[in-house]
Amino acid sequence: MSGAFSRETEKVFSCFESMTKNICNDLATNVTPKPEELGELVRFVSEELFDTINAILRTARLVAEIGGNTMEQFALTDELTGLPNRRAVHDLLQRNEASGWPQEKATIMHVDLHKIKQVNDTLGHTAGDAVLRHVANVLESHVQPDEFLGRVGGDEFVLIAFGEYSEEWTARRAEQIAAGVSAPFVYQSKECKIGASIGIAIGTRSDGDTLSRCMSNADLALKSAKSDMDRAYCFFTPNLRTHFEEIEELQDQIRQGLELGQFEPYFQPQVEARSGKVVGMESLARWHHPARGLLTPFQFLDAAQNGGLLQDLDRHLMEQSLAAMRTWLANGIQIPQISINLTAARLLDVGLVQEMTNSVENAGLHPSNVGLEILESVMIENDSQQMIRNIQNLTDAGFKVELDDFGTGHASISNLKNFAVDRIKIDRSFVKDLHLYSELAKITSAIIGLAHSLRIDVLAEGVESPEERLVLNALGCDHIQGFGVSRPMPGPDIPAWFKDTQQLRRQLPPTGRQGRSSTASS
């Protein structure tokens, strides 16, 4: 390459310039150039100048080739980890489909990481990048020389292997990969803990499988693995595809249902345990499905969440719930509070506080009229700074914060310490047949005592029998909710229920604790 642009090259072009200049000067002055000068010019052009120009062209082609290869390599490489990227994975699949698989079977593992976002939020994106590079190194340590590993997304990796590997061997390998990824990683003296879910698909060439289809199957298996965080991996089965096709169909129906107004809040009364005085209503989603009838959240909530529809559904139900409460109050039905469930996705929304405040104001209500029910597990699984800020700002704005399903998580006391909680809801598992099991009554009593020591009200969920209610009264539980009080009902049915149960209600003598609770709840 250096010879093409050397001093000798400069001399050749200088000599050519000098010869052509002399001949042009002769022609300009009507002097006939000498034949030997013309002959020398022809020889020079056909030999020395020709060779020099060819050398330059060869060098230019080489530079272009090297540059092209470098750019192509750059386009196929993930800049952060140095692994092949999504395009490289696609090219590999296409090449093997065109030329034939190197072996009869192909195994694809799709790896998705957990809690990278939390690392970014708490320690910064530099820490997140360090964790991703660490994970790439961990995965590379599990890859055989003839296998392919690529990064196909922000926190997703794909491993492709050809060979006769048994399902048992593949399962052990997936467990080892998940364990390696989940091992604590220290970044700047701070421990980063993440996890992984792995979807696995095995394709057989003679069965007509394609690598693209195998990749799609691994994606579906990954979705299934992520839906159950207790298992590290999931193998694809044909039933999975049917399952997810049904979910996609349900998601389309949810979209249509939102457009057609098929979703409606139902309301379940919450009352004082001893007196039966209403202290609030919990808003519960119901779907008037055109073919399946009235559906509860258990039948559609997961599909809505996985389809990115949960926030739209939440907003729709919240507006209807606030409008219902405004109507009750306008008609003289004094219901102190309406409780609305907030999902993790809503709690992570940066515009949540302003949106909630605007909605309450537009409905002619005050934030103190609204209780926000948050699953305790949501707080445990999401330590996002944005979620913490939202909860604190909602409290500062005057909203009531309630911990739902209290006692089923793993950090109950720390949640009570870290957040201004107005009420906890004891899970149904601590209430059912409470009168039959003394140990269960002791546990429930301890939960109530803990909350009262922190000046927090307690509501027991799922109260169905008079016996359960009597024991809860004896234990000092403030509020109850369940079929033993009332089943959930649509908003227009509330006035009749209120008239039947509240205006003719028989007052029971309050306990010392009950008097404090009534004042706080009214």
Image: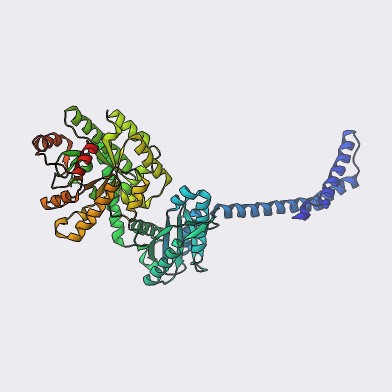
Against 75, residue 20 (above or below) is above
Q: Is 74 left or right of 432, judged from the image as shown?
A: right
Using the image as rendered, state which of residue 153 and residue 297 is in the foreground: 297
Q: Which colouring convention does the figure follow?
A: rainbow
Residue 334 point in image, percent of width and height: 18, 32
Which residue is pictured at 85% across the width and 42% down the height?
20
* Quadrant in the rendering for residue 280: top left
Which residue is at the front of the view, 120 or 499? 499
Between 75 and 375, which is closer to the camera in this rendering?
375
In this rendering, would 109 be left or right of 463?
right
- What count of labels does the image hold? 0
Q: Is residue 409 above or below residue 294?
A: below
Q: Is residue 352 visible?
A: no
Indicate the position of residue 316 as horizontal and vertical percent values: 28, 37
Location of residue 406 in the rendering, given as x and y in whole percent from the top left corner: 28, 51
Q: Quadrant of the N terminus?
A: bottom right
Q: Which image quadrant: the C terminus?
A: top left
Identity of the residue drawn at 28% across and 54% down: 407
Extreme-front residue of the structure: 512
Q: 316 or 514: nearer the eye?
A: 514
Does residue 241 appear anywhere in the picture?
yes
**Residue 59 point in image, percent of width and height:** 71, 53
Left or right of 385? Residue 515 is: left
Q: Is residue 105 above or below residue 84?
A: below
Q: Image point 74% across, 52% down: which residue?
A: 54
